[in-house]
Image: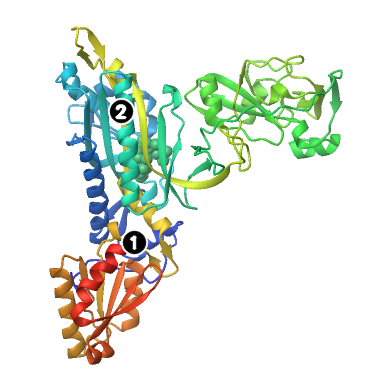
Amino acid sequence: MRTSKLYAPTLRETPAEAEVISHQLMLRAGFIRKAAGGIYNYLPLAWRVLKKIERIVREEMDAAGGQELLLPIVLPAEMWQETGRWDVYGDEMFRLKDRHGRDFCLGPTHEEMITTLIRDEVRSYRQLPLLLYQIQNKFRDERRPRFGLMRGREFIMKDLYSFDRDEAGLDISYKKMYDAYSNVFTRCGLTFRPVEADPGAIGGKGSHEFMVIAEAGEAGIVYCDGGCDYAANVEKAELHPIAAPAAAPLALELKDTPGTKTIAAVADFLGLPADRTVKTLAYATDKGLVIALVRGDHEVNEIKVQNAVGCIALEMADEAAIAAAGTSPGFMGPIGIKNAIVVADNTVMKMANTVVGANQGDRHYVNVNPGRDFTPDIVADIRLIQEGDPCPRCGTPVKAARGIEVGQVFKLYTKYSRKLNATYLDENGQEQVMVMGTYGIGISRTMAAAIEQNNDANGIIWPAAIAPFQAVVIPVNNADPGQRELAERMYADLTAAGLETVLDDRDERAGVKFKDADLIGYPLKVTVGAKAVAEQRVEVKTRRGGETHFFPLAEATAAVKDLLAKL
Ligand code: ATP
Ligand code: MG
């Protein structure tokens, strides 16, 4: 490819709307252009990267026994109504009607479609296991599309579905996918961690997310480097209850605590550390008002609250909902509260002589002993883990990091197969429900994650395996016939040797060409200047690390190939 022909419109300025580095660089380097919020055109450079990621994914899916197919994007409503997701999906689903008024959606995921497809075709245990996948654009009308390709409304996903005879079979399929995912992200040159994820309503030990470690990650993760390999999404990370020092219970007391609406204020007023108080939060849910209690210095994990209560929707309650429960914002507490489900963290139940809001303005109860003075409806682990909390496996203080979820593997068990009636006949001719798993990789998000992890002030530093091109040849002065000729020769030789090479044949200043090469992030830059012509040797610079090598012309192509293999 010649730069003069390459459709990669670069920008000098960083577009103001781009908050994260991958979005900025993809716009600046001419990889993507926006069509609408969360919807992008992939220009040739981006498409080359995406194809490479897809290829790695395909190879690993095929090696794990997957078979590729392609399901429709436009999906009829009926199958979603059968599983109940037509309603549950809410506004995130792009919906449309055909000319006859029938309901359809643009596929956000394909459990319904694949299960309805195979339920009519797969009848015998001999046909199982079955691992089917596709790579396709998915549509989700995200509440907050942002960060460019990271959270799009139209994005590219690989989705694989496994169908097994039983849970033992599912365990095998799951392990195959887990390993295949590890291979995919390793081959893409990414630093990642599989972490335990919250399987939500399905429960069980059933899900891992693959997280690319990067500051811009939307997910918080914790991991243990104290000898055990525990790692989890903070949403999921378990916490054991903390024992409080033994204390003789004192008599409950109602106290005036004027203006103490926060934990810090009430702790200060009473002369107590925050960890001797209890924090109360109120949530509006589809099961009514929920009051969550954690130790004053702890934070609530809303996903855990949701799982403990078994509700679908949960958001902070507004003042009206709090007033309707007969309490007062800033002074809420579990004693005497009505019309609310009270959920207490395990650790709260271990506390003695603590402090809670009295459900009336400017008052708290002190010397509160949970169990004696109030009985929660639910006691569970609802605390959000923090850096330094003990690892739930080995007790070492955990470390925290940010991650970009590039993939997720998930044991569905019979959640969809039961509702959609996907059954088979076993060895004894008995009808059995198929056991399923679902496994997604965000192809376009992986490209963004690769840039988040691999960049510097000058631009992108592509991992060699997914770079749009492997090398660029730059004649310093294109007007010089000697340099031009030598650059053409290098370009032809490298291309003939199977390297994906770009020749920057533009009549631009050398500085401009070097800048663009760094911005686009070609792993290798072959420079042909006056010295190269005079001494018959070329300069080859690695984008990562910026090492410079000089190779005699006769050996240059082989040497560039070697260098690339080592990147
Ligand atoms: P998230 O929690 O980030 O919204 P999800 O858990 O809903 O993602 P899955 O249904 O597990 O996503 O989809 C599989 C993969 O598809 C994700 O691991 C992610 O890499 C990718 N993905 C999901 N949503 C988006 C999006 N809006 N834009 C780009 N990629 C996405
Ligand atoms: Mg996910």
Q: Is residue 94 visible?
A: no
User: Is residue 219 found left or right of 335 in the rendered image?
Assistant: left
- The amino acid sitting under disc 2 is Ile
Tell me the number on the disc at residue 172.
Answer: 2
Does the residue at mark 2 contact the one at mark 1 (Cβ under 8 Å)? no
Q: Look at 70% across and 18% down and name the residue there.
A: 337
- Residue 318, position in %: x, y? 61, 31
- Residue 297, position in %: x, y? 70, 36
Please give the residue where the numbered disc 1 appears in the rendered image: 462
Cβ(mark 2) to ligand 1 < 8 Å? no
Task: Give the residue furthest to the front.
Answer: 227
Mark 2 Cα-neighbour bin, 10 Å: few <14, some 14–19, many ≥20:
few
- Label 2, secondary structure: give it: helix
Tell me the number on the disc at residue 523.
Answer: none
Image quadrant for the N terminus?
bottom left
- Mark toward the viewer: 2 or 1: 2
Q: For this rendering, which residue is in front, 343 or 75? A: 343
Q: For this rendering, which residue is in front, 301 or 437? A: 437
Relative to 341, is 8 above or below? below
Relative to 371, is 459 above or below? below
